[in-house]
Image (cartoon, helix red, strand yellow):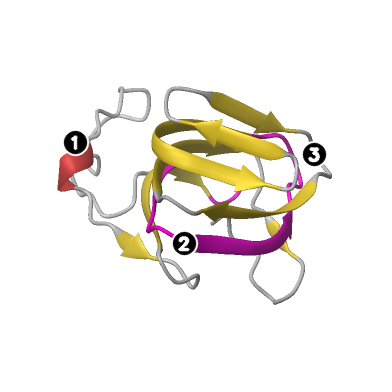
Amino acid sequence: MPAVTPNTSRHDTLPPLASRYVEVDDLPWVSTKYPGVEIKVLMEDEERGLMTALFRWAPGAELPLHEHVEIEQTFVLSGSLEDHEGKVRAGNYVWRPSGSQHVASAPEGALVLSFFLRPNNFLLDSETKSG
């Protein structure tokens, strides 16, 4: 099965078609290469590029210019995210079309749930993974 939840061994013995229940509190926060942005990957399929993840943004954290290769969806659980087009606050949702580009920031900090069909393409460095 190509889809997995990293940092858990609970799924290793499950049959291929069994549901994967994820104890989110048991997953570690992992630092990204971008200061103040941490991630908990809930599900990823590296082969297809799919990823569902929680991101925790410290106040003032920023993701540099990047392109959404496919549709990206984000639900803000707390705090807010903003870019040149606007601001999405806790309890609200934003999706971005494939090909859209922006710099994202969290002046107040944020906790968000994001869904990717393909990894982001970071335009100012060689990073190609979402977040």
Name above or below for residue 20 compared with residue 10: above
Disc with the residue nearer the chain's start (2 vs 1):
1
* Tag in front: 3 or 1: 3
> Which residue is found at the position 29% from the left and 29% from the top?
20
Q: Quadrant of the C terminus?
A: bottom right
- Residue placed furthest toward the bottom: 125
Mark 3–mark 2 distance (CA, rounded to whole Å) = 26 Å
Decide: few, some or many residues near mark 1? Use Cα within 10 Å; few <14, some 14-19, many ≥20. Answer: few
Q: What residue did someone put label 2 on?
A: 60
Determine the image quadrant of residue 122: bottom right
Q: CA distance from mark 2 to mark 1?
A: 29 Å
Q: Which image quarter is the N terminus in?
A: top left
Residue 95's x, y, as percent? 66, 30
Helix, strand or loop status at disc 1: loop
Magenta stretch holds residue 48: yes
Residue that badge 3 annotates:
98
Amino acid type indicated by mark 2: Gly
Residue lying at 48% horizontally and 40% vertically, measured from the top left: 80
- Count all numbered tags in the image, as a single digit: 3
In which quarter of the view is residue 48 placed? top right
Percent of width and height locating residue 74: 54, 34
Q: Mark 3: which amino acid?
A: Ser
Q: Please tell me which of labels 3 and 1 falls first in the chain.
A: 1
